[in-house]
Amino acid sequence: MRTVMNEYPRDSEMWMEALKAKQIQSVTSGLQTRGKICLQNKSVCDIPAVAFAEDLIDAYPNAKIILTNRDMDSWHKSISRTLLPSRFYWLHGLLQHIDWATGLVHPLRVKLWQCLFDDDFEKNGRAAMRRHYEMVREHARIQGREVLETQLTDGWEALCNFLGVDVPKQPYPNENSGGDFIPEMQERARLRMRAVALKWLRIAFWIGLLGLVVGLGVWDRFDHRGLRVW
């Protein structure tokens, strides 16, 4: 979701279209939309892709399937500290009406929350996670597909062996493990708010300047005795 929000906000339109197609069970339309998105990438993960895991497994029969196992309580706590506050952050609700990017991303964020957790993560989050894992395993089993089940602490080796690529020299990424997610999210929202405010201030300045020029032109047609005769 971070990539959609920060790098490709316009992809939100395609993900939203796919969600709507999935809701009305328009499989062909949904797959066409998801195909547009996935053709741009060598891989997809996390939200919003998890909402289409079954469809993507069907659409890409040669794709590798990787399932990252998480302790349920740890995962639930992590989402509650990161994505949940982002879903209900007041500035996102305001920015969606005045900033084009947030206007695309935040409605998708809300829609995903409704589709995945029935808009109640505290009540439905654990059950949704359990269903997702069971669905991926069963769907892959039916198709005879191999699934790499890995842990966040496993590092590069098992993952790279599964993908058939070299092990990178850089450390295994763990960007979301700390407590920086919410401060960074809030700072990005504040920066967007400042950018929007500056944009409208510039627009107001030029409108004001234009009004002044027009006003001076009108005033120049008058003298103290009334309308001049040209």
Image: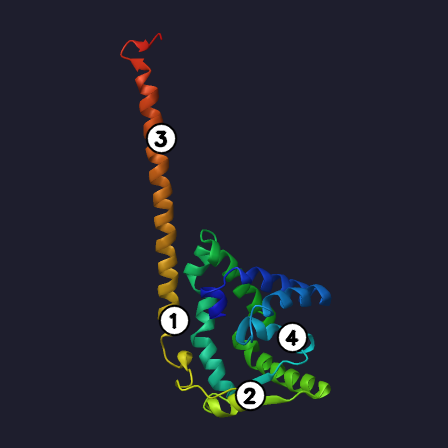
Q: Which residue is mark 1?
A: 182
Q: In the rendered view, does 51 fall on the left or right side of 196?
A: right
User: Quick one: label 3 or label 2, which is nearer the N terminus?
Assistant: 2
The label on residue 211 is 3
Give the residue type that dot 3 points to. Gly
Q: Which residue is mark 4?
A: 56
Nearer the camera: disc 3 or disc 1 = 3
Camera-near label (4 vs 3) is 4
Q: Quadrant of the C terminus?
A: top left
- Say which residue appears at 45% left-offset and 68% top-offset: 86
In whole angstroms, how far apart are the C-alphas of marks 4 and 2? 21 Å
The image quarter containing residue 94 is bottom left
Near mark 3 (Cα within 10 A), the count class, few <14, some 14-19 or many ≥20, is: few
Q: CA distance from mark 2 to mark 1?
A: 35 Å
Quick check: marks 2 and 1 in contact, CB under 8 Å? no
Residue reaching furthest to the top: 229
Q: Is residue 137 left or right of residue 226?
A: right
Q: Classify 75 as above or below 10.
A: below
Number of residues whose C-alpha sits closer than 10 Å to that of mark 1, classed few (under 14), some (14–19) or many (20 or more): some
The amino acid type of the residue labelled 2 equals: Gly
Q: Is residue 26 visible?
A: no
Q: Are marks 3 and 2 in contact (CB under 8 Å)?
A: no
Q: Which residue is mark 2?
A: 164
Q: Dot 4: within a 10 Å radius of its alpha carbon, few (fewer than 14), some, or many (20 or more) residues?
A: some
Q: Residue 100 appears at what percent x and percent y?
A: 48, 54
